[in-house]
């Protein structure tokens, strides 16, 4: 009987996923443990290895939504007859399929990683390196095709890449100026379009968040076919021939749409604004940047706000709560989510137990989570158990907005830009740096007065920021 290839289940709340890319072509040979397909879910992307060796048959094409546990292909062992009518990229099952296992996650191994750089192949074109080794090769600027594998069947593993990096004079963990990991900083749509158009992603300067290569960047590069700097005429020519397209609502975008709509339908949401004088907070941040520079820690204004929110949530437990069918749950810890904007949509990694972390620890963890989000390296643990969310749009010059509560949480704080303002000291005008905070809360959980008291506590902490250090 052939070995079934499942769309693996990732997390309890996963409802849908797609094969972003088959790494083994239909009808090609695969070795057990070899990278088989890349899974795109509503939260994270995964590399899935083959559970057996043999001939691969696809049942679904790339980008086709499926439920976790669905059989998406088969691996036929050597000598095993492959039916002539075995599907290839279709939706029907081959003859005599094996019973679907109760726990499909056990049928394949997955690792949360970024999209790997091109890896070594054997003479017959088969991939012979682990996902972790490919990721590390990209980070250390190692040409993985020159690495000798010491793993099972000659597979290249992390230790092989580290050894090659040391031989090449690039110690493991050292920063490099090269950019071999362009694919890890590009969107799935951009990667797919680049493959179709024959565009080298490594030659494109991304214009998305963190230098991420977007679909528009690939389209612009295609206008010159060489990834050279794109002129205004090139862009106009590309736009003139650009036809209207439709984008499937799936993955992260589908999840965001469903949850935001549900949140507005099921909650009594209201928003209030409050101005905060940030003069002392600005001074403190500048001092901490200098103080922590030797440790590579650069605190942001969001870090100060998250620390203030975490402390205020302890004083106002109903803001750190969830509305249930029969009771309101007051959470024991403040797990603060930080919204990160990606091209595919908004993702909210969580700083676990932010109330028990120092400002330095929050700064270190928020930097890690933001980088992991941009590079598609977030793990499931990074996305779970949030009790409150902070969402910032100030970097875009926004003065006020209405954030939507991330259900089942009771509140979300919107962070706006820091602007010049004017105060009066008697008859003398005084320049101030002011930031507006926008709080949306669930009126089913708490009323306007306690919500305002929570927001006032955040304001007081930011205006006396030394309190954030204790």
Image: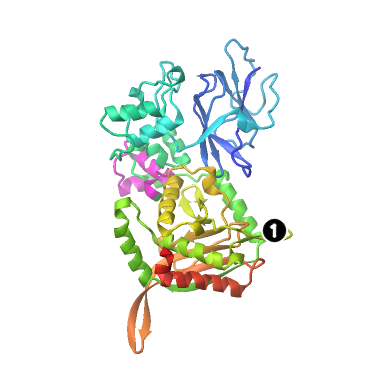
- Main SS, magenta region, reads helix
Image: 255 above or below 150: below
- Bounds of the magenta span? 210-235
Image: 224 above or below 389: above
Residue 223: say if magenta: yes
Q: Which image quadrant: the N terminus?
A: top right
Instruction: Please name whichever residue, 391 or 277, is drawn nearer the observer in this view of the structure.
Output: 277
Instruction: Please name whichever residue, 425 or 420, is drawn nearer the observer in this view of the structure.
Output: 425
Instruction: Please name the residue shown 35% across and 55% down the image.
Output: 298
Indicate the position of residue 128 as horizontal and vertical percent values. Answer: 44, 22
The quadrant where residue 261 appears:
bottom right
Q: Is residue 396 visible?
A: no
Name, please, the residue furthest toward the front: 470
Instruction: Please name whichever residue, 90 or 148, is drawn nearer the observer in this view of the structure.
Output: 148
Task: Using a 10 Å C-alpha cutoff, classify the residue at mark 1 as few (fewer than 14 neighbours), some (14 to 19) or many (20 or more).
Answer: few
**How did the renderer colour the structure?**
rainbow
Instruction: Please name the residue shown 42% across and 62% down the image.
Output: 304
Indicate the position of residue 413 as horizontal and vertical percent values. Answer: 52, 64
Name, please, the residue furthest toward the left: 169
Image: 192 above or below 441: above
Q: Is residue 286 visible?
A: yes
Residue named by callout 1: 324
Name, please, the residue furthest toward the bottom: 427
Q: Which image quadrant: the C terminus?
A: bottom left
The quadrant where residue 270 appears:
bottom right
Residue 412: say if magenta: no
Which secondary structure lies at badge 1?
A: loop
- How many numbered circles does the render carry? 1
Instruction: Please name the residue shown 38% across and 34% down the image.
Output: 136
Question: Taking 460 as reference, is 405 left or right?
Answer: right
Indicate the position of residue 271 as horizontal and vertical percent values. Answer: 56, 69
């Amino acid at each position: 009987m052939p070995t079934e290839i499942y769309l693996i289940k990732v997390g309890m709340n996963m409802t849908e996923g797609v094969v972003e890319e088959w790494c083994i072509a239909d009808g090609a040979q695969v070795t057990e443990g070899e990278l088989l397909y890349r899974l795109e879910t509503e939260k994270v992307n995964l590399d899935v290895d083959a559970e057996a060796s043999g001939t691969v048959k696809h049942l679904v094409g790339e980008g086709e939504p499926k439920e976790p546990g669905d059989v998406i292909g088969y691996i036929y062992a050597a000598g095993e007859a492959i039916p002539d009518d075995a599907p290839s990229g279709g939706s029907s099952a081959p003859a005599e399929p094996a019973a679907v296992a109760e726990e499909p996650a056990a049928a394949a191994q997955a690792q949360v990683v970024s999209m790997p750089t091109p890896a070594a192949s054997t003479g017959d074109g088969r991939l012979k390196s682990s996902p972790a080794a490919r990721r590390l090769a990209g980070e250390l600027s190692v040409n993985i095709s020159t690495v000798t594998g010491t793993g099972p069947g000659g597979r290249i593993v992390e230790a092989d890449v580290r050894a090659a990096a040391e031989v090449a004079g690039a110690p493991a963990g050292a920063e490099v100026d090269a950019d071999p990991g362009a694919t890890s900083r590009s969107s799935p749509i951009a990667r797919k379009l680049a493959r179709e158009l024959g565009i080298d992603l490594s030659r494109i300067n991304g214009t998305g968040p963190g230098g991420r290569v977007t679909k528009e960047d690939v389209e612009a590069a295609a206008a010159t076919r060489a990834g050279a700097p794109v002129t205004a005429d090139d862009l106009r020519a590309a736009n003139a021939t650009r036809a209207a397209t439709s984008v499937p609502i799936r993955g992260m975008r589908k999840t965001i749409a469903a949850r935001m709509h549900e949140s507005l339908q099921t909650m009594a949401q209201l928003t209030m604004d409050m101005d905060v004088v940030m003069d002392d907070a600005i001074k403190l941040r500048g001092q901490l940047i200098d103080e922590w520079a030797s440790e590579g820690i650069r605190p942001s204004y969001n870090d100060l706000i998250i620390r203030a929110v975490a402390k205020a949530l302890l004083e106002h437990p109903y803001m750190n709560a969830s509305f249930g069918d029969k009771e309101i749950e007051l959470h024991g810890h403040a797990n603060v989510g930080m919204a990160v904007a990606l091209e595919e949509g908004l993702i909210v990694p969580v700083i676990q137990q932010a109330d028990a972390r120092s400002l330095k620890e929050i700064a270190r963890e928020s930097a890690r989570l933001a980088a992991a989000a941009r590079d598609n390296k977030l793990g499931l643990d990074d996305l779970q158990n949030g009790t409150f969310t902070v969402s910032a749009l100030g970097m875009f010059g926004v003065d006020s907005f209405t954030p939507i509560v991330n259900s089942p949480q009771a509140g979300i704080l919107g962070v706006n830009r820091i602007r010049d303002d004017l105060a009066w000291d008697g008859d003398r005008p005084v320049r101030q740096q002011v930031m507006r905070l926008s709080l949306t809360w669930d009126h089913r959980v708490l009323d306007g007065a306690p919500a305002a008291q929570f927001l006032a506590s955040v304001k007081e902490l930011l205006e006396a920021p030394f309190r954030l250090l204790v």
